[in-house]
């Protein structure tokens, strides 16, 4: 058996075909996929490629930095707008709150003024009504008395006033030093009995008939003090006291005086 083999189908006179190369032993050239490996490029191409890559990378990172700066600027701008909006809203709310407080304060002040005016009006009306009632009651009760009893009532009130004047002056029972003048209506002076005259004399009072006084009126003058016991003056004092919010005490005192007078009235 020979070590060299002849191709099949061949004959001794035919030329032999070229041998087929073993592909596993052939180095194929590198396929280009868009960029040549740097090891296969020429030096000038290699430098250009590296410069292009460096420029691309620099531009890429510069773009990222610019994007970040723009994003940060937009974020800061948005935050500033939000803060400004919040501040504006707070100012508006504060202004609205202040306006509401002012409106409530003005309304309260107006209501207070109205209530004060109404109170003053009601007080004046109540004072007038009370004065009318007092005058009517006094006139009715005193009108029931005849002249004699009316004179006794007037003298009793005069003696009370003289006693108070003497006590205030510190003279006590030495009231004759007051040198008081008692003015009474002529009708009362005409019916004064000895007891009434002696009581007035003990207080040093000089009786004078005054035609300008009504039957139930009396005026006491002692030094620089005048005690007005006229009915009209009493009514005016009642009205003034009521207007000064002292009507309750005065009304109570007046009621006690009337009760005492009526209790002592023999009729």
Image (tube, rainbow, N blue to C red):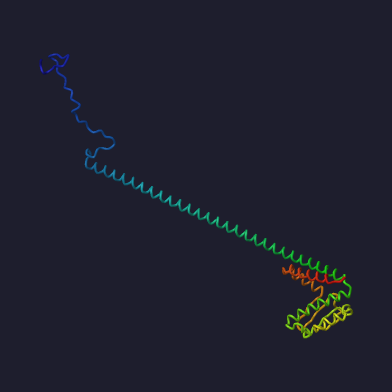
Q: Nearer the viewer, residue 219 or 82?
A: 219
Q: Position of residue 119 (x, y in %)?
A: 72, 64
User: Left or right: 98 with respect to 187?
Assistant: left
Name the residue located 87 percent from the left edge and 81 percent from the top edge: 194
Q: Quadrant of residue 204?
A: bottom right
Q: Nearer the viewer, residue 184 or 177?
A: 177
Q: Is residue 150 above or below residue 70?
A: below
Question: Where is residue 103, by image quadrant?
Answer: bottom right
Q: Is residue 209 left or right of residue 113?
A: right
3 over 219 or under it: above or below: above
Q: x, y percentage for residue 87? A: 50, 55
| Percent position of residue 213, x then y | 85, 77
Q: Which residue is found at the position 55% from the left and 57% from the top? A: 94
In the displayed orientation, state which residue is furthest to the left: 2
Given residues 107 and 149, the one toward you in this image is: 149
Q: In percent of the image, x 62 and y 60: which residue is there?
A: 105
Residue 134 in the image: x percent, y percent? 80, 68
Q: Please tell me in which quadrant of the rendered image residue 225 appears.
A: bottom right
Q: Nearer the viewer, residue 246 or 262?
A: 262
The residue at the point 79 percent across, 73 percent down is 234
| Quadrant assignment for the N terminus | top left
Count of all numbered marks drawn on residues in the image: 0
């Amino acid at each position: 058996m020979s070590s060299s083999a002849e191709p099949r189908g061949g004959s001794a006179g035919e030329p032999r075909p070229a041998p087929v190369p073993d592909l596993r032993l052939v180095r194929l050239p590198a396929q280009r996929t868009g960029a040549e490996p740097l090891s296969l490029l020429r030096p000038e191409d290699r430098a250009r490629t590296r410069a292009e890559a460096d420029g691309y990378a620099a531009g890429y990172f510069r773009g990222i930095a610019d994007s970040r700066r723009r994003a940060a600027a937009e974020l800061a701008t948005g935050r500033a707008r939000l803060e400004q909006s919040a501040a504006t809203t707070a100012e508006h709310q504060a202004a609205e709150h202040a306006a509401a407080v002012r409106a409530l304060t003005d309304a309260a002040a107006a209501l207070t003024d109205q209530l004060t005016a109404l109170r003053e009006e009601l007080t004046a009306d109540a004072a007038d009504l009370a004065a009318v009632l007092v005058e009517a009651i006094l006139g009715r009760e005193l009108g029931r008395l005849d002249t004699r009893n009316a004179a006794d009532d007037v003298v009793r009130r005069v003696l009370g006033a003289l006693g108070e004047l003497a006590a205030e002056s510190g003279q006590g029972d030495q009231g004759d030093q007051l040198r008081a003048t008692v003015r009474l209506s002529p009708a009362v002076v005409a019916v004064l009995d000895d007891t009434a005259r002696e009581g007035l004399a003990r207080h040093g009072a000089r009786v004078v008939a005054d035609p300008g006084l009504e039957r139930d009126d009396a005026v006491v003058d002692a030094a620089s003090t005048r005690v007005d016991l006229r009915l009209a003056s009493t009514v005016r004092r009642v009205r003034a006291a009521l207007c000064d919010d002292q009507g309750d005490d005065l009304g109570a005192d007046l009621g006690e005086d009337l009760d005492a007078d009526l209790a002592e009235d023999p009729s």
